[in-house]
Amino acid sequence: MIMTKDTMIWQTLNMVVATIVRNKTLPETKELFEEKCIKDAQGIIAYSADEIREVLNNSDITGFAEVLVEIYS
C-alpha cells in the first residue's frame, strides 16, 4: 500500500489530537488549537503549514481521540 501525502498528514493529525485529548491540553480557542496541531505535526512530518492546514480543515481527524475518550472515561 502506498501512503499518500494527505493520508500521512491525516494520520499525524489524528495522533496529535489524540495526544491533546489524552493529556487534557486542549487550547482555549479554535485558532490556538489549529496552530498547535500544525506546529506539532510539523515536528513529526516535513509538510508545509498550508498542506497540514488543508487536511486539518477538510478531514475528520478525531478517530484516535474518540477511542481514547472511550478508554479513559
Image (cartoon, rainbow, N blue to C red):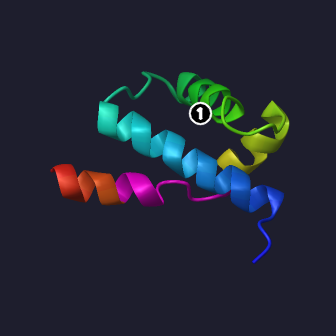
Q: Secondary structure at mark 1?
A: helix
Q: Residue furthest front?
A: 1
Q: Is residue 51 above or below residue 58?
A: above
Question: Is 12 part of what is drawn in magenta?
Answer: no
The foreground one among 8 and 17 is 8
The region drawn magenta spans 58-66
At x 42% / y 21%, what residue is drawn? 28
The answer to whether residue 39 is left or right of residue 49 is left
Q: In the image, what residue occupies the spot 52% across and 40% down? A: 16
Q: Is residue 16 above or below residue 59?
A: above
Residue 4 lies in quadrant: bottom right
The amino acid beneath tag 1 is Cys
In the rendering, at what x and y percent does residue 33 appear?
A: 53, 29
Apparent side of residue 31 relative to residue 71 in the rendered image (left or right): right
Q: Position of residue 67 (x, y in %)?
A: 33, 60
Q: Could you tell me which residue is drawn at 55 percent across and 54 percent down? A: 61
Location of the N terminus by quadrant is bottom right
Rendered image quadrant of residue 41: top right
Q: How many marks?
A: 1
Q: Is residue 5 left or right of residue 44?
A: right
Residue in front for this viewpoint, 28 or 64:
64
For residue 45, side relative to residue 51 (left or right): left
Q: Residue at x 66, y 36 (%)?
A: 44
User: Which residue is denoted by mark 1 in the rendering?
Assistant: 37
Crowdedness of circle 1 by 10 Å Cα count: few (<14), some, many (20+)? many
How far across and how far down the image is residue 34, in percent? 61, 31
Q: Is residue 44 above or below residue 70?
A: above
Residue that extends furthest to the left in the rendered view of this protein = 73
